[in-house]
Image (cartoon, rainbow, N blue to C red):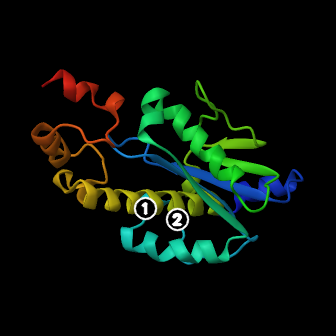
Amino acid sequence: MSFWEQEERCWAEGYALVCGADEAGAGPLAGPVYAGAVILPRYIELPGLNDSKQLTEKSREALFPVIQERAEAWAVASVDTAEIDNTDILSARIKAMQMAIDALGRKPDFALIDGNRDKGQTAAIITPHRCVVKGDSLSASMAAASILAKVSRDRYMLEMAQRYPEYAFERHKGYGTKLHYERLDKYGPSPIHRKTFLRTWEGRK
């Protein structure tokens, strides 16, 4: 199967400029959710390109500037912890993806959206689009978008690790690991923790 099959389907339908969009950070207990949107030149070869979850941190970091340099257009957007708590994570994910699409230097005719949801309670994808389950492993542009989102979020969490060293964010990036819960038990939540994600933790204290 071609890594361009999803894009090819869009081109065949008459959409010339197709972007892929994906998000990172839906599951963590802390930090924003990030999204990337990327329009790639047709059939460009980016050695090592894959779903960000299948790549090492080193590989993602190496691909990040290559994607930025060689894409026709790219953008990254984020929705912060407060808004996640005030709405819901699905709405925040969708909003971040639409924000990234809107921030592209070239307006896409069509968007490929990773996942099976295109709207939440307070946000929706308004660009003409199609949802693709596991799209970041099936489409070059969605894979590129997943890398931009993941690397951008990880870099943010490394900055937060310097600001709040007691939580060891550099080790778990905000995900609910044993270490993270141990630090929460000891220090309580930080300003960047998602309160709505801590209800189970709060309940067992």
Q: Position of residue 189 (x, y in %)?
A: 23, 38
Identified at 35% across, 28% down, the residue is: 196
Are dots 1 and 2 in contact, CB under 8 Å?
yes
Q: Secondary structure at mark 2?
A: loop
Q: Which mark is residue 126?
A: none
Please give the residue where the numbered disc 1 appears in the rendered image. 54
Q: Position of residue 21 (x, y in %)?
A: 62, 52
**Outermost residue, top side:** 203
Above or below: residue 115 compared with residue 162: above
User: Can you see residue 1?
Assistant: no
User: Can you see residue 62?
Assistant: yes
**Outermost residue, left side:** 186
Identified at 53% across, 57% down, the residue is: 146
Identified at 60% across, 34% down, the residue is: 117
Q: Residues within 10 Å of mark 1 (few under 14, many from 20)?
A: few
Left or right of 87: which side holds 1? right
Left or right of 190: which side holds 66? right
Q: Position of residue 136 (x, y in %)?
A: 56, 55
Camera-nearest residue between 141 and 38: 38
Q: Position of residue 7 (x, y in %)?
A: 74, 58
Q: Amino acid at mark 2?
A: Asn
Q: How many marks?
A: 2
Above or below: residue 66 compared with residue 142: below
Identified at 54% across, 76% down, the residue is: 65
Identify the image quadrant of residue 4. Answer: bottom right
Q: Amino acid at mark 1?
A: Gln
Identify the image quadrant of residue 74. Answer: bottom right
Image quadrant occupied by the C terminus: top left
Left or right of 194: which side holds 143? right
Task: Measure the alpha-carbon separation of dots 1 and 2.
Answer: 7 Å
Please give the residue where the numbered disc 2 appears in the rendered image. 50
Q: Secondary structure at mark 1?
A: helix
